[in-house]
Image (tube, rainbow, N blue to C red):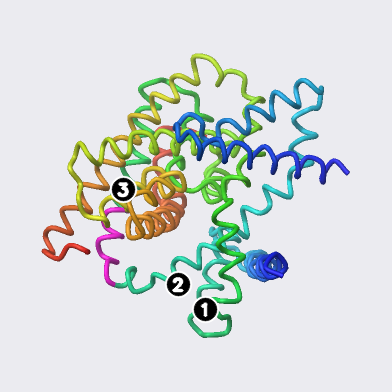
Amino acid sequence: MNLIIFTILTFLIYRFTKKANKKWNFPLLHPLLISPMLIIILIKSLNISTDTYAHASKLLTFMLGPATVAFAIPIYKHFHLVKKYIANIIVSVTAGTLVAIFSSFALAMVLGLNADYIISVLPRSITTPIAIEVSKEIGGLPTLTTIFVIITGIIGGIIGPYEIKWLSIKSPIARGLALGMSAHGVGTSKAMEYGEQEATFSTLAMIFAAWITLAWASLLIPALMNIFHLH
Amino acid sequence: MKLITTILQILLIHLFFFIGVGIKSYVPIPIPASMIGLLVLLLALFLKLVKIEWIEKGGNWLLAELLLFFIPSAVGIVDYEEILGMKGMEMILLIGISTFIVLGTTAFIADSIQKHKGSATK
């Protein structure tokens, strides 16, 4: 019973915040920021524990798996672009993933964060379902990683258009790859505002970033953690 | 009718997810089940075992509503009270600087390669 109620409730709150976001188009009104806030307020005021909610909404979380599988559709449909621009995609997205991991790591060390936070922030630049898997793989805390991925998306969605303008990036491929690499799904929805090409490259960047980061999770990140004794 | 088609297509995509789960339980590879499912589906599309029309509507719905599936995880933030204070500000600063660098680097490299090739996309 709880399962049905909370799934529908979450869905309705999500639809409402999505509509509000469309209407006012203000970055901080992002559904991923407002929906959880409204749900937290609601369950707190009804004295429902977060465990109960997490348990009752697990159907939605489960859907992340099949949703990831569905990314096969854009890859298949735009395979001619993948083939044509494969070198550019791989070089720039590989660079992006390395910069994401190393800059997050360096800044986390400078701020003197504890190991849980340092490890959990490393996969922050990729799409949530894969970031969660990477986080588990390297010993991070999936919930923290989810939050960092969301913050990344929102910040990337806000600064992206300004930075692209400031750096006078004109080619659709560079705009798309940069938005998808730096702000995953949120970046991709921004890329849609530029055009179809930007949106396609953003989606491809997002998928390649996830694959490349998965590789780093078993090669690079364990080495990094060994050097700095983070376990 | 449209709703039923979409639901059936989503179920078909679930099948590929479960194939991924199945493969992962037999072969111990460090790739998430969902990624294995994605690769199997991609292969099935290229081998014409599955037609794109069979999954496109359902798949596009899943991708369009991706944010919905993150919400329960995001609610988990209340278990980390420290993040609502100073720690949260630090994390926003860290992520902001890092995202700025990642976006700039990726855009710059992709743009340079594109210019070097001398063939900008239309």
Across and down, in percent, residue A93 comes to 32, 53
The stretch of residues the image draws in magenta is A84-93
Report the residue marked by disc 3.
A178
Is there any visible trace of residue A193 in the rendered image?
yes
Does the magenta-highlighted stretch encompass residue A86?
yes
Q: Are marks 1 and 3 on the same chain?
A: no
**Residue located at (58% from left, 80% from top):** B50
User: Count the marks: how many?
Assistant: 3
**Residue located at (56% from left, 73% from top):** B40
Q: Determine the secondary structure under disc 2.
A: helix
Query: Left or right of A30: which side holds B72?
Result: right
Report the residue marked by disc 1.
B45
- 3D distance between C-alphas at marks 3 and 2: 21 Å
Q: Chain of mark 3?
A: A
- 3D distance between C-alphas at marks 1 and 3: 28 Å
**Residue located at (58% from left, 18% from top):** B82
Q: Type of residue at label 3?
A: Ala
- 3D distance between C-alphas at marks 1 and 2: 7 Å
Which corner quadrant holds the N terminus of chain A? top right
Across and down, in percent, residue A199 comes to 38, 56
